[in-house]
Image (cartoon, grey):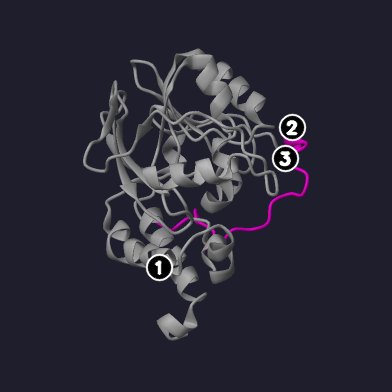
Amino acid sequence: MEKRIFYAPVNHPRCGDDLEHPWKYAVPAYRVTPHVWNVGGQDDVCAYLFDTGEGLLLIDTGYRASLYLLVDAIRSLGYDPRDIKKILLSHWHWDHVNGCAALQAMSGAEVWISREDEVFHQRFKGDTSELPMVDYTATHFYDDDAPITLGRFTIRTTLTPGHTPGATSFRWEDTDETTGRTYRCAMHGGLGVGLMTPEMLSRFGGKQEEAHRFVADCEGKLAHWPVDIAVPSHLNQGNVLANLPQDRSDYSVWVADYAWRDCMLGRAEAVKQMYPEVYGR
């Protein structure tokens, strides 16, 4: 079977006014695994809603301006955002956390992040020179030796620095009761390689060693994970709009056991090209 293209080799620029006019870039909810939907509501950053059978779990929360699209998406599926029990943040950047405070207040949900990125959350929460951060309260920190469980899901975390010092990746299994098939799923917490240049790492307090660890992790560990469904943190990273099925509940289009490995190796190569003095290019 011919491979479909799911991952762009690098990020492409965002639309200039998406933060002020999110409705122009609205994307209805669509299913990515049997019990998981992307409810981010717009065509940039994803937010994944897990129906655990014992309450809801959310990975990432999107922009402040698009929060209403996220809430509408959750309700359109027949769920109540007040039933969110846990919010897992992939990293500290504004576009992934700025809906968190409102959802935390609405639901009383636990909020999880890595200890490494909580340091940056605290450092930048009052800084308005970039995108103003909407503050939230972290209640739990990831322990890669202690999976997070809720209902039908057991989510394993892995610290994968590079995009940020504390970017965290997630793995879980999801079973379709109709077919009886179980899918191995994964989301990398920080695939934006543009922030791994020496200039950008310096700007946001990172270290070049993190970029090199990103390469080593992608090539030496992550590329070998067995993954049936690779879940992107941004739509452009997954070439989502080009692949969206007419039936938004049909997750079968995302089943591709080669996509994760291709992505990990491709992103590692993109970072290597930024450091020719290290990797001989």
Residue visible at 77% across and 49% down? 16
Q: In this picture, which residue range is highlighted in magenta?
A: 1-24
Residue 217: percent from left, percent from top: 33, 61
**Amino acid type of the residue that numbered disc 3 sits on in the rendered structure:** Leu
State how far apart marks 3 and 1 are (Cα).
32 Å
Q: Which residue in the structure is indicated by mark 3? A: 19
Residue visible at 48% across and 28% down? 137
Taking 266 as reference, is 136 left or right? right
Lower sequence index among marks 1 and 2: 2
**Amino acid type of the residue that numbered disc 1 sits on in the rendered structure:** Glu
Taking 269 as reference, is 174 left or right? left
- Tag shown at residue 222: none
Residue 150: percent from left, percent from top: 30, 23
Q: Along the line of sight, which residue is nearer the eye, 190 or 231?
A: 190
Q: Which residue in the structure is indicated by mark 1? A: 209
Q: Which residue in the structure is indicated by mark 2? A: 23
Residue 31: percent from left, percent from top: 48, 31
